[in-house]
Amino acid sequence: DELVSQIAAGEVVERPASVVRELVDNALDAGATQVAVKLVAGGVRSIVVEDDGAGIEAAELPLALRRHATSKIGSLVDLESVSTMGFRGEALAAIASVADVSLLSRTAGAAHAVRLDARSGELGPAARAVGTSVEVRELFFNTPARRKFLKTDATELAHAVEAVRRHALARPDVGFSVWHEGRLVAQWRAAGLDQRIQDVLGEDFIDGSRSVEHNAGPLALQGRTGLPEMSRARADQQYVFVNGRYVRDRLIAHGIRSAYEDVLHGQRQPAYVLFATIAPELVDVNVHPTKIEVRFRDGRAVHQAVRRAVESALAVSRA
Ligand code: ADP
Ligand code: MG
């Protein structure tokens, strides 16, 4: 099972940022309103994610680390909803197979917190407010070949901050902070969506972009799309979220690019932040273990909706 987990880890855990993504995901699933991410050496030495979510019952702590153990498919009704199905309970087990993991958690009803060290299995009382801290130390200590592929601390830190940035855009109602070796490197306070976009991507992103609104066909779209004058230096700022989750999707990216070609005759690399909402039965989110890819039931309709929505946003700005 350890080996199976290590293989799964190969798909889920590429670098510290992948760990950050999974841990913050869990914090948000637990209903956190505040999430703190604390890194040492770009996250290679240590990653701690602290949340004020519901916590994990003491008896459930060892289960959280077990493969396919998930508290998130509670009933048949859940199983039928594709939004919570598939690749479940993989992340913590995968991470624990390639790093030293400890969990510290407290639920609302508990008299005190409980700490579990994954390696030793030691379980004991500890101090903490309601919520969970997950600590991941010495990533890839047992797989030196993969550790060797990690970049400099500064690069790994940048990737980790980017992972939090994506979550921050998806969940403006939650406060996030990122610390590196005791220094606060990013902080986003709970806000509305426009404010959060401004806080994360800058005021000039707002000034240099147009609002996208679309509410017809299979999906609703909302967000901002950049104008040529601001997009150049921001070509890498392309964020697409499907039902609240950051994804990379060629179809949507192509729909956006087509709109730029139609309206602006060029502009290969526009910057954008787009939130797509689509009925869960019209999208498969379990294409990849990290859920970074999706498959739409009707790709053509999605492509067309995206293209039209961005086209009309750009046309308004040109008028
Ligand atoms: P999944 O998120 O797919 O269920 P994970 O391996 O990421 O699988 O997590 C396993 C389980 O551990 C979760 O289902 C949840 O019950 C528990 N868990 C992990 N992190 C947290 C957290 N921050 N707060 C509360 N529960 C958590
Ligand atoms: Mg998870």
Image (cartoon, rainbow, N blue to C red):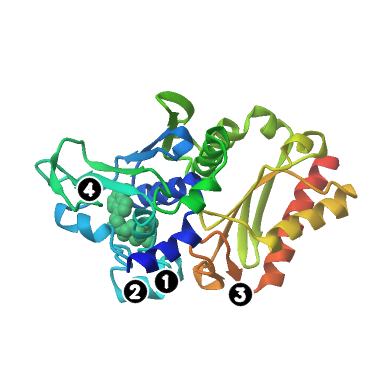
Q: Earlier in the sequence, mark 4 or mark 1?
A: 1
Q: Determine whether the residue tagged by mark 2 lies in a helix, strand or loop.
A: helix
Specify the label residue 77 is tagged with: 2
Q: Determine whether the residue tagged by mark 1 lies in a helix, strand or loop.
A: loop
Q: Earlier in the sequence, mark 1 or mark 3?
A: 1
Name the residue rendered at 75%, 59% in the picture. 254
Pointer 1 and pointer 2: residues touching (CB < 8 Å)?
yes
> Spatial distance from mark 3 to mark 2, Cα to Cα?
21 Å
Residue 298 in percent (x, y) is at 65, 74
Tell me which amino acid carries mark 3: Arg
Q: Is mark 1 within 8 Å of ligand 1?
A: no
> Spatial distance from mark 4 to mark 2, Cα to Cα?
34 Å
Query: Which residue is at the front of the view, 306 or 239?
Result: 239
Residue 275 in percent (x, y) is at 59, 52
Q: Determine whether the residue tagged by mark 4 lies in a helix, strand or loop.
A: strand
Provide the residue designation for mark 3: 297
Q: Is residue 231 left or right of residue 118?
A: right
Residue 131, compared with residue 74, is above or below; it is above
> Spatial distance from mark 1 to mark 3, Cα to Cα?
15 Å
> Spatial distance from mark 4 to mark 1, Cα to Cα?
34 Å
Residue 44, compared with residue 287, is above or below; it is above
User: Few, some or many C-alpha atoms within 10 Å of disc 2 (few <14, some 14-19, many ≥20)?
Assistant: few
Quadrant location of the N terminus?
A: bottom left
Query: Which residue is at the front of the view, 125 or 228?
Result: 125
Residue 308 in percent (x, y) is at 76, 58
Provide the residue designation for mark 4: 117
Tell me which amino acid carries mark 1: Ser
